[in-house]
Amino acid sequence: MATMNEKDYYAILGVSKDASARDIQKAFQQKARKLHPDVNKEPDAEERFKEVSEAYAVLSDEQKRARYDAMRSGNPFAGAPSANPYAGGYSGGYQGYTGSPFGVPFGGAQRRGSAFNPEAGADVVVDVDLSAVQAKNGARRAVKYRRYEPCDRCAGSGSVSSGSSHTCPSCGGTGSVEVDLSFLFGAGMFQTVCPECGGSGRVISDPCPECGGSGRTPVVTEAVIEFPPDTHDGDMIRVKAMGHAGTNGAEGGDLVGRARVASERLEGPARTGFYLIGFALPFLILFAVSGIVSLVTFICLAMVVSGIVSIVRAGVRDRSRLWWKRGLEQIVSGCANGLLLAFISVSFASCSRGMMMGAMPL
């Protein structure tokens, strides 16, 4: 979840940065009345209502607003009520690293702010092309990929002082905040995830300027993946702890090398041919058991013939070592998709035949 200095709460409520408490309440009332789920039935109304409620929860409280303004200004100490960050419950944010230079592969922007939220790192999956010889005899392949690694400056903790975190002053460690909506539809108190700690209940007093408090930084790295003999297409090899590092010192993920063996892959017309056979089989079996012959029966027979022709022309036996296994997978997939339609078709045909026989004169 985005921390509170990543959102422009003034823009969300449509007020200026020097708006009075009365202006903020008035703007919230207007937006909340329009977006309340009991009134607005649009799909995103509830999410937008939570967003304006979150903005109001921060800007309507003088201390939270002061901390928010301080974090947005880039001076984390400007909003601290005391020179000692622990004495006054300070939880400033650091306007340091704001995004991944690699863009989409890292899943968007790096988390900013002071939230302390340890989360395990994800695995990184890399496809590695192997020839038929390499797959049979085994191979060592070097790969270059993008990942998050623990921040060198803060040793992965996200804090300059190596791990100091304290209770979030906005929610008191509960991970959620309440907004008084008693003036709106008589709704009473509304609870939402704390925007400062992101629901963890903990914040960092001195976020690392290198990683922005997340405890990890994006890099391009290399690793060697060793595929054993008799590797097959789709096999996966794990390299421990070489995936994305976790946030705030949490356990990291693995690097997963996925073998791609072209000689074992079933593609194009052959793949379609096996699928057509599988799709038609439930129809033919059910029609045969029920003793019904219809136009659908001949269509399914044509699909089987077409599938066999496609497979033969593709020459899968000469090109793929595991053609039978890949073909069976496609047949099963086709059967699964065609089974329900086959039951419906047979039921419809049985009902039609029963009605016709009932209408015949004795």
Image: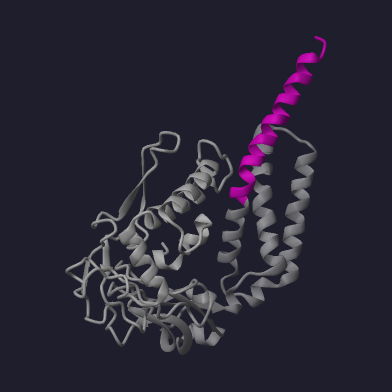
Q: Is residue 240 visible?
A: no
Residue at 32%, 74% (x, y): give it. Answer: 78
The answer to which of 82 and 335 lies nearer the viewer is: 82
Residue at 29%, 56% (x, y): give it. Answer: 175
Q: Which residues are magenta?
A: 335-362
Where 219 falls versus 120 (above or below)? below
Instruction: Find residue 239 and report its image quarter.
Output: bottom left
The answer to which of 214 and 356 lies nearer the viewer is: 214
Magenta stretch secondary structure, dominant: helix
Task: Residue 68 in the image: state x and y as whole percent.
Answer: 37, 66
The answer to which of 356 and 262 lies nearer the viewer is: 262
Is residue 189 left or right of 15 when viewed as pictured? left
Instruction: Find residue 205 and report its image quarter.
Output: bottom left
Q: Quadrant of the C terminus?
A: top right
Where 181 falls versus 83 (above or below)? above
Name the residue furthest left.
87
Asked whether residue 22 is drawn in magenta, I would say no
Q: Quadrant of the N terminus?
A: bottom left
